[in-house]
Image (cartoon, rainbow, N blue to C red):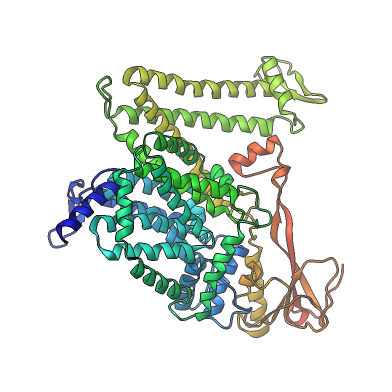
């Protein structure tokens, strides 16, 4: 590299790395030697990343078969399975994510079979890589911000749920973190390979990841434009560095490599030539999302999902976004622009699903990680001598107080939900009654006559119940005020900046704990519950019961577990078609008639048996449940928020009947009782 190129590289590096020069590896913490023969440098930082990798894999890849695939996941998996196994019933399908399609095809082909775990595994692994991707940035952000960011992404409920539900947005966000790193490597070294790899990653984001991948690219571009527009000096070195980088970019070589990779992945390395049509379908589906919204999906659905599962990241992320716009460097303002674009897409793009909440949470998480690092490392100035343990101790006490508030709120919720009569539906009247009088909490019926208080016209509650509610409200408010007192006390000792940092850290940790609980419940315990906001159209575990019954009937009829003849009046591209993947003698039909004599028949449930050419025994299954959030009262809204439960339970939203021919079932005729 000549002197001119070295000068250009140095200037570009200075422009592109607003947080300073790359962090030298030699300044890491002291390594733990394992022996001279191994020549391995193991640092505490490395051990932390190993622990984060294990945790990320456990959260994303553990118990992936706990819930059946819903229709969208099943269509994605069936598209690959039918290409690699000609025995799978049904016609070819177009995948919604060519990248997931290619990896599923390889996984199914190498394993010789398919199940829920194998179908979800590629995206789950991508989710783990997304959580570890900040490690690439440690040389540019310094080790601590990258480590904090990786930890936040590992425990992110939205990132975990997206990875466990085959959301193609996981691929998009992984590429969105890798592409800028590749660009910085090109700026730093001037080597063409980094630019070519960045171009390939950008092409994968747009053409291979998911239909709305191009919106993420536009969001990244808007971030750069936003950082430039909010720069006090439009001719700053950062902008000049971007211009030089664009002029030095190997456009022709990058475009050729990107085209080869896109074609190769879409066709599974030229094994499935028809897969190339999925690229066009992905782009068309992405454009169609501007004018079409899936049935049953609310307006601004990703924004609601982000608020439901990551309230702490959203709240503190918006504060960090404001700080970045007012005081941040080029890098932080670019992140702010990316986050603003994600918020706009989440609200205005009709084709967005639950996984697109990552549009909001990922850039805001990066901003929060940068702020957390400042809170942990910044020391006091001339006026205030803040000890190193001051801010962490304040954060710990704040966190403990918020835990006490949370426990008090839970107990308050119990009293409102279970002790107060359910007939109390007027919240205004209840609040007015609580503030009107002071009620005794003595429940000794022998020594005190318990009064019955009219809360609203015609509805009475015991005075001691109202007294306990008053007490719990008082405790909740007083403990919350203690945090305010602690804030001012710390501020008087070490200044307002230190007080804010301790308060913010403690509050953020408390909100992250709440979010982790909500995300864990959604990912593991309520995977098929329609009351869970993430699950737009879940399938019940009765699908597993259907497969077990078919297997047992096949063994009876043929001696083999998968040779049963099945007639299925179900969509050939949904969850039920995936459940029938192992039964090659399955025929999908639009209706039933006298010509149907197969050993088993699957059809929507109806009051009268359908006309068929043989006698059958029927078994009804509930494969879907329905629930409307509008059924929530103020009682149920509290219960739904922190427990995901409600008084109005889900009802049957989709029933089918499995009909088994009498001779297969083992009876000559069915007697009616």
Residue 14 at what x, y percent from top left? Answer: 25, 47
In the picture, residue 437 is in which quadrant?
A: top right
> What quarter of the picture does the N terminus occupy?
bottom left
Q: Is residue 357 above or below residue 489?
A: below
Going by the image, does 536 lie left or right of 62? right
Kindly give the residue lying farthest to the front in the view shown: 235
Quarter of the figure that contains the C terminus: bottom right
Residue 230 sits above or below residue 574 on the image: above
Q: Residue at x 74, y 56 (%)?
A: 652
Whether residue 361 is visible: yes
Quadrant of res 323: top left
Q: Is residue 497 found left or right of 31 in the rendered image?
A: right
Q: Left or right: 42 with respect to 324?
A: left
Residue 21 image offset from top left, x and y in percent: 23, 46
Q: Nearer the viewer, residue 618 or 573?
A: 573
Coordinates of residue 157 in the picture (x, y in percent): 49, 48
Q: Residue 529, how many percent across, how many down?
A: 63, 53
């Amino acid at each position: 590299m000549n002197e001119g190129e070295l000068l250009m590289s140095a200037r570009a590096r200075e422009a592109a790395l607003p947080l300073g020069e790359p962090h030298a590896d030699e300044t890491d913490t002291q390594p733990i030697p394992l022996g001279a023969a191994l020549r391995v440098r193991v640092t505490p930082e490395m051990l932390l990343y190993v622990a984060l990798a294990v945790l990320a894999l456990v959260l994303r890849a553990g118990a992936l078969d706990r819930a059946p695939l819903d229709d969208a996941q099943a269509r994605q998996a069936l598209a690959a399975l039918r290409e690699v196994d000609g025995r799978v019933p049904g016609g070819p399908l177009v995948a919604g994510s060519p990248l997931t399609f290619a990896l599923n095809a390889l996984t199914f082909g190498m394993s010789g079979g398919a199940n829920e775990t194998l179908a979800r595994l590629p995206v789950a692994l991508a989710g783990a890589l997304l959580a570890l991707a900040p490690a690439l940035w440690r040389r540019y952000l310094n080790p601590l911000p990258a480590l904090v960011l990786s930890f936040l992404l590992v425990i992110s409920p939205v990132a975990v749920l997206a990875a466990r539900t085959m959301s193609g947005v996981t691929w998009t966000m992984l590429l969105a973190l890798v592409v800028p790193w590749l660009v910085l490597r090109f700026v730093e070294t001037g080597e063409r390979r980094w630019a070519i790899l960045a171009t390939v990653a950008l092409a994968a984001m747009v053409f291979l990841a998911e239909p709305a991948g191009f919106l993420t690219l536009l969001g990244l571009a808007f971030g750069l434009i936003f950082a430039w527009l909010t720069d006090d000096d439009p001719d700053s070195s950062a902008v000049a560095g971007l211009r030089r980088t664009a002029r030095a970019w190997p456009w022709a070589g990058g475009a050729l490599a990107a085209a080869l990779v896109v074609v190769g992945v879409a066709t599974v390395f030229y094994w499935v030539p028809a897969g190339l049509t999925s690229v066009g379908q992905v782009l068309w589906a992405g454009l169609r999302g501007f004018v079409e919204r899936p049935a049953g999906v609310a307006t601004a659905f990703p924004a609601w999902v982000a608020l439901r599962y990551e309230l702490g990241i959203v709240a503190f992320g918006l504060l960090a976004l404001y700080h970045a716009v007012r005081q941040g460097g080029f890098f932080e303002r670019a992140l702010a622009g990316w986050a603003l674009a994600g918020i706009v897409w989440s609200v205005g793009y009709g084709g967005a699903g639950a996984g697109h909440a990552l549009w909001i949470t990922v850039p805001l998480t990066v901003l929060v990680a940068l702020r957390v690092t400042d809170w942990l490392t910044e020391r006091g100035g001339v006026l205030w001598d803040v000890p190193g343990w001051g801010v962490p101790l304040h954060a710990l006490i704040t966190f403990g107080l918020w835990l006490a508030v949370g426990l008090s709120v839970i107990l308050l919720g119990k009293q409102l939900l279970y002790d107060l009569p359910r007939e109390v539906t007027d919240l205004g009247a209840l609040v007015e009654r609580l503030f009107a009088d002071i009620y005794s909490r003595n429940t000794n019926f022998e020594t005190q006559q318990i009064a019955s208080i009219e809360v609203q016209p015609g509805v009475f509650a015991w005075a001691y119940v109202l007294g306990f509610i008053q007490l719990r409200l008082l405790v909740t408010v007083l403990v919350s005020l203690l945090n305010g007192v602690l804030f001012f006390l710390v501020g008087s000792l070490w200044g307002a900046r230190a007080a804010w940092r301790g308060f913010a850290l403690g509050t953020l940790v408390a909100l992250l704990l709440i979010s982790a609980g909500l995300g864990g419940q959604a990912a593991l315990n309520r995977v098929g519950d329609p009351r869970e906001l993430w699950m737009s159209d879940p399938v019940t575990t009765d699908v597993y019961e259907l497969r077990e019954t078919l297997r047992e009937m096949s063994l009876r009829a043929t001696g083999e577990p998968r040779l049963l003849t099945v007639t299925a009046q179900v969509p050939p591209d949904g969850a039920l078609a995936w459940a029938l993947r192992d039964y090659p003698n399955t025929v999908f039909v639009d209706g039933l008639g006298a010509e149907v004599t197969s050993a088993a028949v699957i059809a929507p449930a109806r009051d009268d048996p359908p006309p068929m050419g043989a006698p059958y025994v029927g078994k009804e299954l509930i494969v879907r449940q329905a629930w409307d959030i509008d059924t929530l009262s103020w009682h149920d809204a509290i219960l739904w928020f922190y427990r995901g439960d409600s008084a109005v339970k889900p009802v049957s939203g989709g029933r089918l009947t499995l009909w088994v021919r009498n001779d297969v079932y083992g009876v000559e005729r069915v007697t009616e009782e």
